[in-house]
Image (cartoon, rainbow, N blue to C red):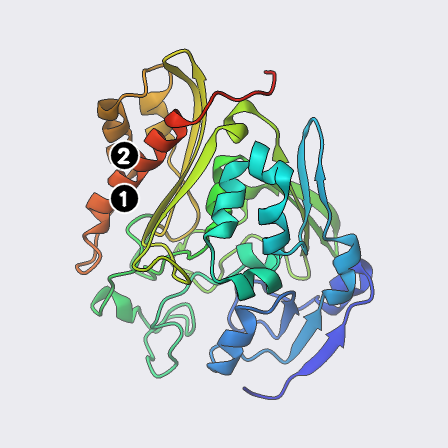
Amino acid sequence: MRPFSYARATDLAQAVHLGRQTGQGQTDAPVQLLAGGTTLYDLMKLDVMVPDRLVDLGPLRPKLSSITPSAEGLHLGALAKMAHVAAHPVVQADYPALAQSLQLAASAQLRNMATLGGNVLQRTRCSYFRDPTWAACNKRNPGSGCAALTGFNRNHAVLGTDSSCIAQYPGDWAVALMALEADVSLTGPLGSRRLPFASLHRLAGGQPQFETNLQPGEVITAFFIPASKRAQRSVYVKVRDRTSYEFAIASAAVALEMDGDLVRQIRISLGGMAYRPWRAEGAEAVLTGKPLTEANAEAAGRAALAGAAGHGHNDYKLTLGPQTVVRALMQAKALPPASRKA
């Protein structure tokens, strides 16, 4: 790890001021915001990220860690710990996919340390990015190429990639946020704004060194998840090589509202298979207004992976992905109907 300077932000205004050169999701940004640090410290030790300054957001935690349910929805402070949110009874009862995505993430020790805001900003990365001895990594060295294209790419993405990068977004929490149509609140040098969570992460687009649409100095302050029957009848399914402390090789979040035997509304998102958290709108269209049968679920699974492309070692995801969607759909169907009013 290389030398760096360290500053503690005493309030949000100071955090924004100190973070003017912050580039969340940018390897070469000279300033990085520090929340739980569970990813940032790791990449700094590997000499992948070498910021000149860290701005510690820890002092902001008392004001940015609330868990506040209401009739309209769930407000979550960005510095709330993953473990605290996963254990909250209202989250478990009314937003089960959120609780499940957090419970299945990382390890108990990391969940006790990591924050919600830091978790969604973890780097889209792979083993080539994490190892500086590989020169060809457009995310780490723009214009150098992508070693994964012709290298070992078993865990890499099959959706949303291009020739500049095929890394997969590794998070779980973000996948559930996509399915529950969350919003994210931001504060930066130009003031505060709120945007759909689906707009936070970028595709590679030939520039994989830029991972989010955050402006320099912007700080994630909160998440809002609207209350709905779909949210109450939601699930998160994660498939991985081992049952703990492992990223997904395929995952799916489903939020479902039924009208008798018919699908009234549904939201489906994917993880472990895409460059960023991925909304499967084509799969939703296949099911809306139809019975949720095994055959229709299989058709939705195929639609969810429409346009997917394997790169050799990860071709198995083209089969595993649809199967994961089917599994999540059948689990959501088996849940009792939502109790909240329309």
Quadrant location, the C terminus = top right
The disc at residue 301 is 2
In the image, residue 316 sits, relative to residue 237, either above or below, namely below
Which quadrant of the view contains residue 40?
bottom right
Q: In this view, does 222 lie to the left or right of 328?
A: right
Residue 227, image x and y in percent? 61, 28
Q: Which amino acid type corresponds to the residue marked 1 in the rendered image?
A: Gly
> From this viewpoint, is residue 101 visible?
yes
The reply to whether residue 198 is visible in this rendering is no
Q: With 250 as the anchor, is 233 left or right in this view? A: right
Q: Secondary structure beneath disc 2?
A: helix
Residue in the picture at 62% in, 58% down:
115
Left or right of 148? Residue 58 is right
Eyeballing the image, is 135 above or below 287?
Answer: below
Return the residue nearer the eye: 6 or 80: 80
Residue positioned 67% across, 41% down in the render: 194
**Helix or strand or loop: what does disc 1 sit on?**
helix
Pick the residue in front: 175 or 199: 175
N-terminal-most mark, 2 or 1: 2
Residue 255 image position (x, y, % from top left): 46, 31
Q: How crowded is mark 1: few (under 14 residues within 10 Å), some or many (20 or more)?
A: many
Residues tagged 2 and 1 counted as in contact (Cβ below 8 A): yes
Name the residue located 36 percent from the left edge and 46 percent from the top edge. Answer: 251
- Residue type, numbered disc 2: Gly
Q: Which residue is located at x 53 percent, y 30 percent?
A: 231
Disc sitting over residue 321 in the figure? 1
Mark 2 crowd level (few <14, some 14–19, many ≥20, 10 Å Cα):
many
Foreground of the two, 213 or 253: 253
x, y percent for residue 163? 29, 59
Across and down, in percent, residue 271 comes to 39, 48
